[in-house]
Amino acid sequence: MNKPITIDDSTFDQMVLQAKMPVLVDFWAPWCRPCIMTAPVLEELAEEYAGRITIAKLDVDQNAKTAAKYGIMAIPNLIIFKNGKPVSQIVGFKPKAELKRSLDAVLD
Amino acid sequence: MNNEYEIIIIGGGPAGLTAGLYASRAGLNSLLIEKGLVGGQIADAELVANYPGFVEGISGLELGQSMHQQATKYGLNTIIAEVTGIEFQREKKVVMTTKGNFTAKAVIIASGSERRKLGIPGEEEFTGKGVSYCATCDAFFFKEQPVAVVGGGDVAITEALHLTKFASKVTVIHRRNQLRATHILQEKVFSEHKIEFLWNTVVEEIEGKDTVKRLKLRQVITGEKSTLDVSGVFISIGLTPSTDYLKGVLPLDAAGYIATNERMETEIPGIFAAGDIRRDSARQAITAAGDGATAAIYTEKFISQ
């Protein structure tokens, strides 16, 4: 089973910016219901895109530095990083099909 | 996975979960399809104080999860998927979803409603950049900053009160001269010093650069225009039914709601509707639950005919 990984302010650089594979970072918080709704979809995507895209979760409540750096003002907020740069962003709860379109676009 | 059921229920809020409880207890093989998290809109509520039986109130999330556990105990099946359409094949109804097709003898539509948008310039551009539809999610990002709430109902006022824990100032912008929110909420909001009101006022445009900077306002009686500097605007102007997948399947009224009779029957035999999605629904957790029970009881009668 391939699961989403948990990252924080201290590991963001290594796990996301220096990663060889694209990384989808889920900026989330435990008080946010649409974030909790997104979680099972991300677990499925981690499985389906194993070896192609890393799915990572960052709790904005505990990691304000990284959230501020990327101007997060609403969650759930999914940013896809490729070669250390944000290339795609999805704000709010979105159906799985839409998330897959964004992931596929980055992989092309 | 089994694809054939006696009843399929679309939507896992209080209406769908109660329908699921009644259908399962009646011994019907039932499937509930939910697109997000069981509980529906009620799961957003920090405290539900008007659901009878809970003297001190209950958290919306807990209420939703308890309803789901209770229905599951009697055999309700649940999948998380999005419904894309419904087709009719003789006596059977085919519900198409992102996880495949499922068939049933009867369908209860309980997919509820979602937040309505203002439809003004800047709203879409700045969504996630200061425009928000969920104060519980996003209030955190507006610490010591001025924000506005658009709307005057229970949800808008609850959100304004929540925002006072973070923001420096909260301006409630309402197009009428009085609130629709319940008396108890009004008492709370009028005694909160961080909250100010702009009555008879509408937002015409959201302006900014990268993020929201100000709102362009119009007083609806005098026509006077003004601006308000804010870092965030929380839009809470009511709900719109989640019926996109029903266009061409079922007659909907101009606002997108489904008409039913007192048995929750729609114009199509074997298709029932319950909860917020129904025209004239009171849009309360308890009335939705009542609709769900009624729909399940008459669905059982329909199936046994």
Image: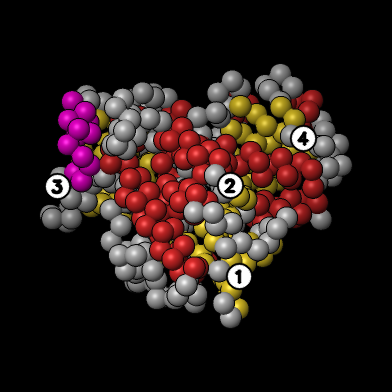
Could you tell me which residue is drawn at 33 percent across and 30 percent down? B54
Name the spot of residue B25 as percent of width and height, x first.
50, 49
Q: CA distance from mark 4 to mark 1?
A: 33 Å
Residue wearing tag 1: B94
Whether tag 4 and tag 1 are in contact, CB under 8 A, the answer is no
Examine the rendering and report whether any part of residue B95 can be seen.
no
Q: Is residue B183 magenta?
A: yes
Q: Nearer the viewer, residue B35 or A18?
A: B35
Q: Are marks 4 and 1 on the same chain?
A: no
In primary-sequence order, the first of circles 3 and 2 is 2
Q: CA distance from mark 2 to mark 4?
A: 29 Å
In this rendering, the answer to whether B214 lies above or below A107 is above
Q: Secondary structure at mark 3?
A: loop
Which residue is farthest bottom?
B90
Q: Which residues are magenta?
A: B179-191
Q: Nearer the viewer, residue B201 or B181?
A: B181
**Mark 3 chain:** B
Q: Is residue B14 left or right of residue A24?
A: left
